[in-house]
């Protein structure tokens, strides 16, 4: 069992690891959304973990909005990213790709065959699972990529792959995602 990562120090760490409040899909997807249209870091906790070797109720993944872009300006913000994770698809959300693979959903090539999602039914199943189990928190942060790197190096964040080779779950998750992609490439393109 991989336990919840705890690390002392930064106020930002506490705000994500032990947040005062966690938000559900239903709460985040309303208009106006409580998620600010600002730059920052978000953290995902799960009432029921997506894999038996992960703990419930603790921070398992962090993401940022926008991602670091040296050559152009991103239009992404916390509101857009958090809402997309709750209702988007695996092609645009590494969190959804990871969760779907861990939950055993079938990844498929779609459109031109370059994009991969869990198809309409699979994405709907994943959205429902997230509505029931995934909770999110966030903090506004001017340069979120710096904080993200610190968090990944200091905390046990098993669902993050980037910058996280040191994590005990990394190789297992990477292999699960690679197997799902390999199976998807062997299947016909889905409509």
Image (cartoon, rainbow, N blue to C red):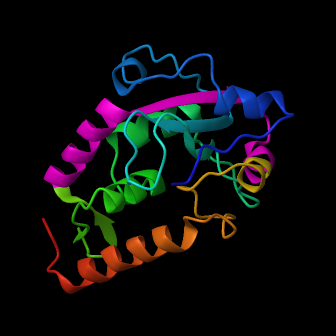
**Identity of the residue drawn at 74% across and 42% down:** 144
Q: Nearer the viewer, residue 190 or 1?
A: 1
**Identity of the residue drawn at 70% across and 55% down:** 72
**Figure quadrant of residue 163:** bottom right
* Quadrant in which the C terminus is drawn: bottom left
Q: Nearer the viewer, residue 44 or 35?
A: 44
Task: Residue 77: say if magenta.
Answer: no
Q: Position of residue 58 (x, y in %)?
A: 55, 37
**Figure quadrant of residue 109:** bottom left
Q: Would you say residue 38 is visible in this rendering?
A: no
**Figure quadrant of residue 168:** bottom right
Query: In the image, which residues are magenta?
Result: 120-149
Q: Position of residue 30 (x, y in %)?
A: 36, 17
**Identity of the residue drawn at 55% across and 54% down:** 2
Q: Position of residue 121 (x, y in %)?
A: 14, 51
Q: Is residue 129 above or below residue 138?
A: below
């Amino acid at each position: 069992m991989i336990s919840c990562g705890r690390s002392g120090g930064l106020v930002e760490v506490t705000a994500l690891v032990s947040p005062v409040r966690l938000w559900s899909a239903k709460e985040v997807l309303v208009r106006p959304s409580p998620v600010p249209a600002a730059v920052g870091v978000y953290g995902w906790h799960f009432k029921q973990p997506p894999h038996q070797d992960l703990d419930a109720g603790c921070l398992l993944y962090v993401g940022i909005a926008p991602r670091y872009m040296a050559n152009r300006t991103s239009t992404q913000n916390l509101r857009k990213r958090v809402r997309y994770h709750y209702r988007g698809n695996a092609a645009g959300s590494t969190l959804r790709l990871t969760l779907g693979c861990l939950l055993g959903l079938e990844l498929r090539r779609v459109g031109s065959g370059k994009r991969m999602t869990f198809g309409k039914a699979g994405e709907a199943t994943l959205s429902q699972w997230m509505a029931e189990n995934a909770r999110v928190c966030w903090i506004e942060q001017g340069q979120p990529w710096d904080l993200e790197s610190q968090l990944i190096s200091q905390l046990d964040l098993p669902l993050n792959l980037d910058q996280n080779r040191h994590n005990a779950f990394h190789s297992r998750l990477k292999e699960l995602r690679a197997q799902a992609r390999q199976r998807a490439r062997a299947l016909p393109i889905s409509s």
